[in-house]
């Protein structure tokens, strides 16, 4: 079973700060997902990556397959970035593709 | 394309009652997943459909839980004889495997409170 660990569990930042959230996993994967969950429950997919680096606006996600580690960076953070960020790893076995989730990182960005 | 929808968004029920939730995936998505999320935890896999076939069920899905996807479109998740431990957010996600992409699109969830 894949274990997914995120750090930190909670993060408070001032508007404009550079944010880093880390994710480690224990077993080889097909892809890693970064998800954003706002109060009320809805989950939005931010990135899915299996190697290297992806960028979307102020968000950057990197993954190191050898070290089984990924980071999500937010540049020039804004209060609207406040949310829970969840790392999930996916493994494709046979016909199924199943996600194992971390517990999430609660980010609060203060104005 | 309106995204994944779930109904109801909130459900309060008394212990011992049966509840049923519905998920409407993105049209033409052939895979549909159910997850459960308790407070302070990440979602946990419950079950998965490819078209109308239920291909995998987690050990978390006790005999009181049943899921269907009768025509390969919407899905229902029923919990019989609810217990307080069933209180959680129930999330549905859908995906269409294409070109090796496994991206899942999540619905807003149904929050269940068992009193």
Image (cartoon, coloured by chain):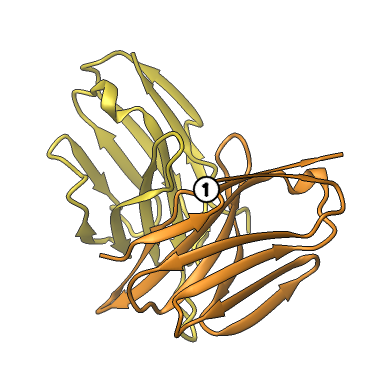
Chain colours: A orange, B yellow
Tell me if B71 is positioned left or right of B6 in this view: left
Q: How many marks can you see?
A: 1
The quarter of the rendered structure image containing the C terminus of chain B is top left
Identify the residue at image location x=40%, y=50%: B74
Identify the residue at image location x=30%, y=27%: B19
Q: Position of residue B79 (x, y in %)?
A: 25, 32
Crowding around mark 1 (Cα neighbors within 10 Å: few <14, some 14 to 19, many 20+) is many
Q: Position of residue B31 (x, y in %)?
A: 38, 65
Q: Position of residue A48 (x, y in %)?
A: 55, 72
* Mark 1, residue position: B107
Q: Is residue B49 above or below residue B19?
A: below
Which quadrant would residue A83 be assigned to in this image?
top right
Tell me if A61 is positioned left or right of A67 in this view: right
Q: Is residue A32 above or below residue B24?
A: below
Q: Position of residue A9 (x, y in %)?
A: 54, 46
Q: Is residue B96 above or below residue B72?
A: below
Q: Nearer the viewer, residue B83 or B97?
A: B83
Q: Is residue B13 visible from the viewing direction of this image?
A: yes
Which quadrant would residue A5 be assigned to in this image?
bottom left
Identify the residue at image location x=49%, y=56%: A6
Q: Is residue B29 visible from the viewing direction of this image?
A: no
Identify the residue at image location x=46%, y=37%: B40
Q: Nearer the viewer, residue B51 or B36?
A: B36
């Amino acid at each position: 079973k894949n274990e997914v660990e995120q750090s930190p569990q909670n993060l408070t930042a001032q508007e404009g700060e550079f944010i880093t959230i880390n994710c480690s996993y224990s077993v080889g994967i097909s892809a890693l997902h970064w998800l954003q969950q706002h109060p009320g429950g809805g989950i939005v997919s931010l990135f899915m990556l299996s190697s290297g680096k992806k960028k979307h606006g102020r968000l950057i996600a990197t993954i190191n397959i050898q070290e089984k580690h990924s980071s999500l960076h937010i540049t020039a953070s804004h209060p609207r970035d406040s949310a829970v960020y969840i790392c999930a790893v996916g493994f494709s076995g046979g016909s199924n593709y199943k996600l194992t989730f971390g517990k999430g990182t609660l980010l609060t960005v203060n104005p | 394309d309106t995204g994944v929808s779930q109904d109801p968004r909130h459900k309060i029920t008394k212990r011992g009652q049966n509840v049923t939730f519905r998920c409407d995936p993105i049209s033409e998505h052939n895979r549909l997943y159910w997850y459960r999320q308790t407070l302070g935890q990440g979602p946990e896999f419950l079950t998965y459909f490819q078209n109308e076939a239920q291909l995998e069920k987690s050990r978390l899905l006790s005999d009181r839980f049943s899921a269907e996807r009768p025509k390969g479109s919407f899905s229902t998740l029923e919990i019989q004889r609810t217990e307080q431990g069933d209180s959680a957010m129930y999330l549905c996600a859908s995906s269409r495997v294409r070109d090796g992409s496994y991206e899942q699109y999540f619905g807003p969830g149904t929050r269940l409170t068992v009193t």
